[in-house]
Image: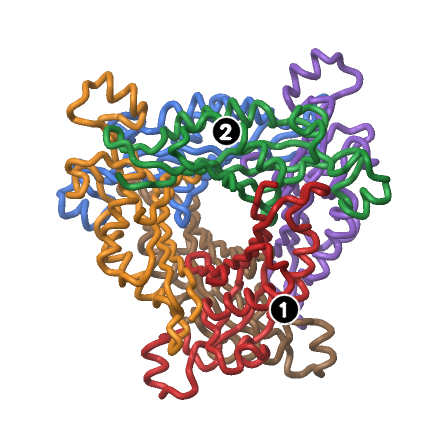
Chain colours: A purple, B brown, C red, D green, E orange, F blue
């Protein structure tokens, strides 16, 4: 059967701050600039989850997009939406919540629920002009 | 010469219904949900056709995008635009018109007209949040 | 208090067909073109509901956008999403489902639930290039 | 001379929290839901500033959009971008930073710099689906 | 009958240069900056034509959007698309092709073809961040 | 460390003309159509620069997007924005400024500044419907 990629867009918004606790304020500001604001800032994160696999000949689906919407809701939106990533989300207790690291965290969470025969790719927009993508390489 | 991908966006809108005639109404509704409405529903399908090949050193083109626009018009828009995919389009007489299957059908139709040295990829948006892509694998 | 407009975007998709039962097939086709296809076609309708009123000094809200989302869900999405407008929706039993008429129908349905001191405007995209708006004039 | 509106889009991102210090936690949560998270959440705010006035017959401009870009940068972006609206911005010390109130604050700040013969309108997107607008009424 | 606005989006691209022949090079550069480049620069202009009128009870249309598409094609696209506004378009022989002036020119051209009982508004995007609108005031 | 792609969007606008000086006017017009207008036309070019590399464990960044913004500004925007590509840009003195060739030129300019361990991909939108991409193959 043809191997097709299905994509689902989703949305969450969150506050965060970029910094390392083991660095001085000066170094944190030099590296992270205004993203280092100790009172936090925030973003509307736009997410695209892409799953590649063979079309199921019975249904014509690669992966039911309604089920994918529910999976994203449970695993991503309920964990990250309207949260402070630094303070409210355990994965970032000791991990700087850069777009790159958020993207990898979402990949790892969803990878557990997607069959091994399928490929997974995560694209995460932090702003309309800055975005990242990760496919487990 | 450098190998570049050229992309052309296009649009068509159509009605469809997801179901299998060999399944009961209950099973069809369980699998396809409200997409199974026997009176049909519909979408604005947004299409991206992507062709990869070497730049022609004479023209600076990989593939004339004006000619690609015409090819999409003849092969895709005239066949699918303002149609009922289940009732009006022969490729879906015995094939469930899921986004995945529509994407593969468009790929197969266009592949016949694109030189073998060039790669082809089809991306099809069924809604702004649900889309699929296929490159012949 | 300042008079501010709050806007909420929503989405539904549906099949429809433009025609008048009291006209001949020829006249219907002449006036409505391919929108007259007897087997229906369809669209992703994008909706913007805009409510203008004074800011409530206690909450800082004009109208709670979470409540507006629920109102749109109940009054518009559950009635129109994944439906055939001609066959499944009672408002169009005797009304041609042009974008203009759909827009007025949605306005009338929501107007009943919005306080008289507030203004209401409906914007409805039938395709990314064709849209209509109505504010009760 | 014709009276034309010129529009300029801009962007800032910020953290905020909706709450009233004179309300109980229960009431705050009941009214503001997850927007009440005490650790803050955040948004990419998209801003449109619209100025209406007569075309200057010498330049063909209503208002030099390069100067408007600089005005927005000084008055809005430098004050709000990468900030915590509740903690870092004096206008919200005693004002709940709802989208409505942020929109009015931006209007008042820019109104001081725009000639009385010109009309001003502010449109502020808090998310791609929720936005507000204000023109000083 | 309800008074509804119908909107149609269109596109053209063109080269232009902002300058006044009766000003010195220094003054032209001071006022128009890099838009004054004597070799021209260019834009993808996105156009929205909005017509307000009563719904025709026979058709359910305010103005047939297919006919509006053709009118825009004849009056705007064929005149401006792939042109140098300063050199190829007679309306700008003695008029600086700012976004404001282009918008008024398009309004005047289309106004001749739209019935007096209908209102007309033109919105013209020069870039995704800079746009103008005019409704004949 | 995970290998992630970071993307940055940018913008420039320019005039250009497609033609070969060694071809007759007839042949130039036949091949390049209205893009051959001797007085030039123009576009808003939207650019996406994508860099793939390992996350730096100290910063959580693959490539500082603020530095990428500056690199794009220096290498691309200052060279191409508000320019006539044929007349003002040395790379196109003897190279037809098709979207494909512009994309390769931008790739070559940026490739010099990006470490060999990182992959680079350029996507260039000439219009919202026509775009090209190149990754050095």
Q: State left or right for residue A76 relative to residue E66.
A: right
Front residue (pair A57, E51): E51
Q: Is residue E116 left or right of residue D46?
A: left
At x 43% / y 28%, what residue is drawn?
D114
Q: Compared with residue D104, is residue A48 higher up or lower down, i.e. above or below? A: below
The mark lying in front, picked from 2 and 1, is: 2
Q: Quadrant of residue B56?
A: top left
Chain on which label 2 sits: D
Q: Position of residue C41 (x, y in %)?
A: 48, 73
Q: Is residue F71 above or below residue B122?
A: above
For residue A60, the mark is 1
Question: Around disc 2, counting alpha carbons within 10 Å, would you say few (fewer than 14), some (14 to 19), or many (20 or more)?
Answer: some
Q: Residue at x 30, y 48 (%)?
A: E136
In the rendered structure, find residue D110 and report the number of the disc placed on it: 2
Q: Chain of mark 1?
A: A
Q: How far across and down, in percent of the image, does residue A107 sit?
A: 72, 43
* Neighbours of disc 1 within 10 Å: few (<14), some (14-19), many (20+): many
Tell me if residue F33 can be seen: yes
Q: Secondary structure at mark 2?
A: helix
Q: Find residue E22 and report its horizontal and vertical position in percent.
A: 15, 24
CA–CA distance in space, label 2 to label 1: 55 Å
């Amino acid at each position: 059967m043809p191997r097709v990629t299905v994509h689902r867009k989703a949305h969450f918004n969150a506050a965060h701050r970029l910094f390392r606790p083991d660095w001085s304020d000066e170094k944190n500001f030099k590296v992270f600039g205004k993203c280092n604001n100790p009172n936090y800032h925030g973003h509307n994160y736009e997410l695209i989850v892409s799953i590649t696999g063979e079309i199921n000949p019975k249904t014509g689906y690669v992966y039911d997009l309604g089920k994918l919407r529910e999976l994203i809701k449970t695993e991503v939106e309920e964990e990250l939406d309207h949260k402070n990533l630094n303070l409210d989300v355990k994965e970032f207790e000791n991990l700087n919540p850069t777009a790159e690291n958020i993207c990898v965290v979402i990949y790892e969470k969803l990878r557990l629920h997607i069959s091994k025969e399928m490929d997974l790719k995560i694209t995460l927009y932090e702003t309309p002009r800055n975005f990242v993508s990760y496919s487990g390489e």
